[in-house]
Amino acid sequence: MCGIIGAVSHNDIAEDLLVGLERLEYRGYDSCGVVLLQRGNLSRARTVKRVAQLRLEVAELQLGGRLGIAHTRWATHGAPVTANAHPHMSPGDDDARISIAHNGIIENHDQLRSILKKKGYVFKSETDSEIIAHLVDSLYDGDLTDAVSQAVTELRGSFAIAVVCREEPHRLVGAKHGMPLIIGIGADGNYLASDVAAMPVGVRQVVYLEDGDVADVQLREHLVTSADGRRVGRDVRPVDGNSAAVVLGPHRYYMEKEIFEQPRAVSDTLQGIDGITPELFGDHAWRAMKQVSSVLVVACGGSYHAALTAKYWIESIARLPVHVEVASEFRYRDWCADDNTLVVAVSQSGETADVLGAIHRAKSIGMTHVLAICNVATSTLVREASMSFITRAGIEIGVASTKAFTTQLVALFLLALTLAQIRGVIDDEAEGRHLTSLRHLPDAMNKVLELEPKIVEWSKHLASRENMLFLGRGVHFPIALEGALKMKEIAYIHAEGYAAGELKHGPLALVSKEMPVIAVAPNDFLLEKLKSNMHEVSARSGRLFVFADHGCGVVRSDGVDVIQLHENYGPLSPILHTIPMQLLALHCAQARGTDVDKPRNLAKSVTVE
Ligand code: M6R
């Protein structure tokens, strides 16, 4: 994972690098650091704290300069300690000639380390990345671009790197293989970054580097060389300029802000959709979708839960078989490939390494119709897919996915309706009814958000627990999984999501007074079955906390607490039932004093395997 930003400019770039790092913290925040060329020396500040602390250190050391690189880390090789924080220097810290920032994993680092040690290089960190600094230094002969071009031929694994050299004050060199790296073109200078969002406001154009590219970024130009050594011109694209939209406003946490933004996010996602048509997914979607005989959805984490929900929708509305696969598993399994399978990749970021790996695998075995459902229009996933639907959740900062998740559900419901229409298994009246429900969804979501004070009361009781079970049935089973995931990731409470019917096959043994059970209880055709499962809990002295639809007859009693939602919302009910799960996790986390937006050990975007 990790995020990189580098700059070469006519002006001081320290602030640009620090702001860029703040915007890249979603890629990891175990440590961060910056190197600036100052009075002919590469000067560095690093910290295992957040960028705010780095900013203080940069000020204290009076660091500044017109050439520099910066990095925010998610530890893979070596603990999150200062010595392992990037940028790394070579040959030594005091006499540094080369400095690098790296995103990715160098698989042959052990072998290269031994070779470099024999050449006299002394390693200061446990990282795989430090070898790149020494390797470039060992190859340096007056031209940094040449040295980097030679170095990358010796690296195995995945990388995006930004490199500076003390002796070349007007040159920033980047190289990419398997990790994103983008050139930003500004009026006063040029940049390299992992993500467009990290570019300063003045950057209006960007260039997406391709695997194998080495970029020589100078003050007024950038030159790109491809893996075969040819000079290539990569497309220059305009920037949509939404990076400034990251303002917390009156909220304490981004997650809270993002939960309350959901009605707006859903309404933006539906904007301009007057009817169901394959064109919602791209110009050529009809051609690909009309021959589809099954659907394979690949995703990770919360996006995987959205995909599981979609399985229920697509199978019942479009009458198509759906397989849902965890992307990290699918990419390495044997699969009976079928060219008539529609592959759907669901990802907030569009940069999740396992999701990208899964679509590469799908394509390599002949499944070429790939639809991306993604929140980032410029992401690698969208660029690599043949069709796409961009959710309009807006930038999501909190590590826990909230508005991205519910807008993914909206997109997947639209997909179910579209496939049903193409297959002729839905009539106009039913289609119109579903569209009307979708349009009223933001209002219904606002009503659920009004339940927050009741959920805060529950969280006072639940936050002290160390274990929880989440139960759901049918299309709400994935929502129970999502509730448990949220509780784990931000409140650090061990939580398991179960299909309620599975309870008696094992987990019932865990139920006692000490194990709260959260139940998702919509007023649907499975309600009576769920009620039986809840009785199984009550009979074992288990304490139930039930989110029940109005009219479902689940009432408060001894050992059973109920928060009532409004009327059942039909097939879209899982979207409404997600919101209490998010609020419960948020308030438990808040009561436990965790870092809600940046939970320990995690990162927003998981760009390594
Ligand atoms: O960007 P993606 O949707 O591909 O990310 C997938 C998961 O890493 C992500 O959903 C993760 O599980 C969230 N932190 C869940 O809240």
Image (tube, grey):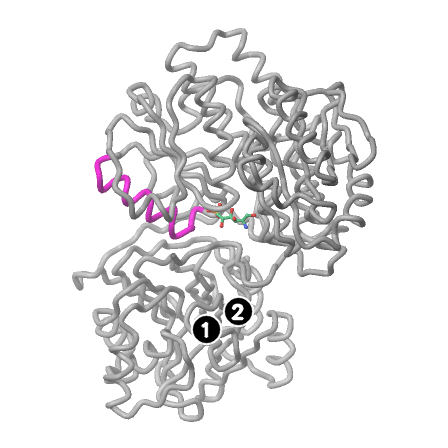
**Amino acid at pointer 2:** Leu
Q: Residue at x 39, y 27 (%)?
A: 322
Quickly name the residue at label 2.
Answer: 17
Is residue 138 a member of the stretch shown in magenta?
Answer: no
Quadrant in which the C terminus is drawn: bottom left
Q: Quadrant of the N terminus?
A: bottom left
Q: Is residue 120 above or below residue 20?
A: below
Ligand 1 closer than 8 Å to the CB at disc 2?
A: no
Q: In this rendering, is residue 504 above or below 181?
A: above
Which disc is residue 69 wearing? 1
Q: Marks 2 and 1: in contact by CB < 8 Å?
A: yes
Query: Which quarter of the figure has residue 143?
Result: bottom left
Q: Amino acid at mark 1?
A: Ile
Q: Which residues are magenta?
A: 350-366
Q: Residues within 10 Å of mark 2 (few under 14, many from 20)?
A: many
Q: Is residue 351 magenta?
A: yes
Task: Indicate the position of residue 58 as horizontal and vertical percent values.
Answer: 59, 80
Q: Where does the image place residue 16, in percent across and percent down from the top left?
A: 54, 67
Q: Main secondary structure of the magenta part?
A: helix
Instruction: Tally the numbered discs.
Output: 2
Above or below 102: residue 27: above
Of residue 337 and residue 437, the one placed in the foreground of this image is 337
Residue at 30% across, 83% down: 137
Q: At 42% from the left edge and 14% from the top edge, which residue is drawn? A: 421
Q: Answer with mark 1 or mark 2, whichever residue precedes in sequence.
A: 2
Query: In this view of the protein, can residue 295 be seen by the observer?
Result: yes
Residue 207's tag is none
